[in-house]
Image (tube, helix red, strand yellow):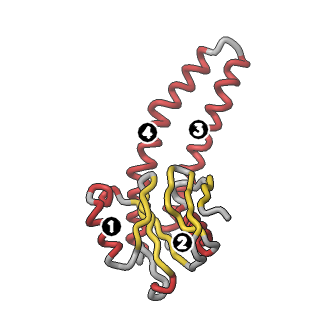
Amino acid sequence: MKTHKTVFRYYTIMEYEKEQEWLSRQHRQGWKLTAAAACFYRFERCAPEDVVYQLDYSPEGRKHPEEYVQLFRDCGWEHVLDNVGYSYFRKPAAQMQGREEIFCDEASRMEMFRRILCHRMLPLLILLVGMFVPLIIMELLEADSAADALVTGIPAGLVVALYIAVFAQCALQYIRLRKGR
């Protein structure tokens, strides 16, 4: 029987709730999270248990990691790992008092979204508009033929479309949250 497994799973920045649910489901199936790098998750076989996973995105937490982790530890959360700016925490459901979440109110959830938008999405938008789009335009203008333009234009267009979709998803989720879901 396998004792470890690695799974590729892609979540956008704003899909942290789906990621939390998926990690909890894995734990209920006997696989606890031990490591993560970008979209690759490493699990170790364990006794199936109902465990709640929560993610937080906090640049302040990265500046003061000991105090940050201790704050959650004091509330009974185990710090599992950090991955692409997010901190992963877990807690057995049996130790929870009702529906316990890291974000106990909409204001703190909004603050996390604001941090994500300012620290992750805004730099990507600046990079896309400031560097990537001009490079694409230059490549297309300098192409020797329509075929060359297509070879450059189609993949570049797909990347731009992907970025736009992620930005739109983040903006819509932020607006929904501001309106009270």
Q: Amino acid at mark 4?
A: Ile
Quote the CA–CA distance across marks 3 and 2.
28 Å
Callout 1: helix, strand or loop?
helix
Q: Amino acid at mark 3?
A: Val
| Label whose residue precedes the other's in the sequence (3 or 4) | 4
Outermost residue, top side: 144
Quote the CA–CA distance across marks 4 and 1.
31 Å
Residue labelled with disc 4: 126
- Judged by depth in the image, the label closer to the viewer, 2 or 1, is 1
Residue labelled with disc 3: 160
Quote the CA–CA distance across marks 2 and 1.
29 Å
| Label whose residue precedes the other's in the sequence (4 or 1) | 1
Decide: few, some or many residues near mark 4? Use Cα within 10 Å; few <14, some 14-19, many ≥20: few
| Label whose residue precedes the other's in the sequence (3 or 2) | 3
Question: Residue 102: x percent and y percent?
Answer: 41, 73
Residue labelled with disc 2: 181
| Label whose residue precedes the other's in the sequence (2 or 1) | 1
| Label whose residue precedes the other's in the sequence (1 or 3) | 1
Quote the CA–CA distance across marks 4 and 2.
28 Å
Decide: few, some or many residues near mark 2? Use Cα within 10 Å; few <14, some 14-19, many ≥20: few
Residue labelled with disc 1: 69
Decide: few, some or many residues near mark 1? Use Cα within 10 Å; few <14, some 14-19, many ≥20: some
Outermost residue, front side: 1
Callout 4: helix, strand or loop?
helix
Quote the CA–CA distance across marks 3 and 4.
13 Å
Question: Residue 3: x percent and y percent?
Answer: 60, 63
